[in-house]
Amino acid sequence: MAEIPITVRGDIEPRAVDQLRRCAEAGDAVAAAICADGHVGYSQPIGGVVAYPEHVSPSGVGYDIACGNKAVRTDVRVDDIRDDLPRIMDEVFARISFGVGRNNAEPVDHPVLDAIHKADFAPQRRMVQMARNQLGTVGAGNHYVDLFAGDDGNVWVGVHFGSRGFGHKTASGFLALAAGRRFDERGPDGEMDSPPVLLHVDSQLGQDYIAAMSLAGEYAYAGRDVVVDKVLEILGATATYEVHNHHNFAWRERHHGVDAWVIRKGCTPAFPGQEGFVGATMGEPSVILRGTASDESAGLLFSTVHGAGRVMSRTKAAGRMGNRAECSERDCPTWVTWAQYRHERDRAGVGEHDRFTLCPRHPGGRMVKRRGRIKAGEIDFALVQEQLATAGVELRGGAADEAPAAYKRLDAVLAMHGDSVEILHRLTPIGVAMAGADTFDPYKD
């Protein structure tokens, strides 16, 4: 059997390349590639693209089906809103729901909800109320709503998020079905280096997945449209130009003379002339780019980065959250892990409801169970906030795991892609809104 061509851009850890090769070989792929922002993901690496002649891969598409980026240029000039920017970002953060499982405080109607109500894949119909509740919400993790100062002097709006709980439940349901379980059962807890889940496109399950994935994609697009429209309303602005595309999806394309299902997990399609919005970190310029016709582009299966790419895990950056036993006295900083507290309480022979404390400052007090940080991270987020404020960025929400130091530099990542893309606009952040600190989003890419 001929060796499958695999293209690697940038300094990618070997484990991520091994994941990509495993995925490619499992489905007799035409070719595979990993972009310069790539890193280890579940089964298929984030930033990886694989072209299968006869299979689609729910594990390759992932849980946040059709996560994507939309950017619009507005008719508002940056200088005209600069003084009002704090109020604008306050309103963005107040009116758009950020965080895990959040509902939209301002529900909207949309034709995609009728499509879900009549979905070809019947189990999706039961999710219409959840889809309605979450339409226009952003979630957490690396998902955001940003305002930018464009290199043209205009205000730009940029968003990044996907299909929320609707996409997540669709993905998890098909992973359960592929394992021989019911759609509403929990699927197997696979390891990060698990082989890919592949569905033959001629099977009923494969056809059902393609239909369900496509509908989740429509829902993701609708959500981004709703959020951008709300920001435009807050700005009192009109969009004069837009770029909207996605990743975490399977497309039917032709590569190396073969028709194939192309799975892009955390990387953006960039065919010649196709435009895309690629976000950087909260403190650095993002870009509008366009794919080019070149051998380099073809080697990457006409794909490019979808962001800067992580260099630091969320836990390493922000620390670890867990249950703590905290002194109940006001403003007392004393705490221990809940496991340590229980161990010491048992050693002392004290009952669960009896007064007991490990606080040396308040020996007559008690300790209460709360969730908090039990391991410090490497990033001082207070310093990050100060630096962003000095740079003129109005930050709402965010946490250490999304700090610039946790990511590669976007310019360096794009340089690794040579002439496969060209930069059309650079967008400097002036307002960033994300979920608050210490949140985790299972729907993120």
Image (cartoon, rainbow, N blue to C red):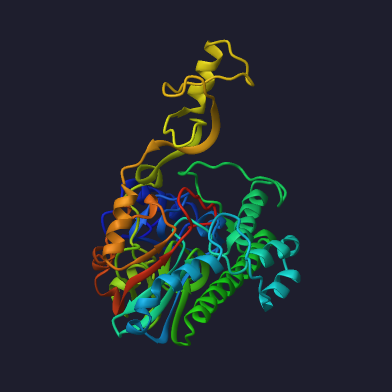
Q: Quadrant of residue 203?
A: bottom right
The answer to whether residue 258 is seen in the rendering is no
**Is 312 on the left-hand or right-hand side of 219?**
left
Residue 180: where, in percent of width, then height? Answer: 69, 46
Indicate whether 20 appears above or below 262. Answer: above
The answer to whether residue 37 is seen in the rendering is yes
Residue 379: where, in percent of width, then height? Answer: 31, 47
Q: Nearer the viewer, residue 287 or 363?
A: 363
Residue at 34 percent of width and 72 percent of height:
298
**Quarter that holds the N terminus:** bottom left
Q: How many marks?
A: 0
Residue 425: where, in percent of width, then height? Answer: 31, 80
Indicate whether 247 appears above or below 13. Answer: below
Residue 430: where, in percent of width, then height? Answer: 34, 71
Indicate whether 313 appears above or below 396. Answer: above
Q: Quadrant of residue 198?
A: bottom right
Indicate whether 377 appears above or below 360. Answer: below
**Is 250 on the left-hand or right-hand side of 403?**
right
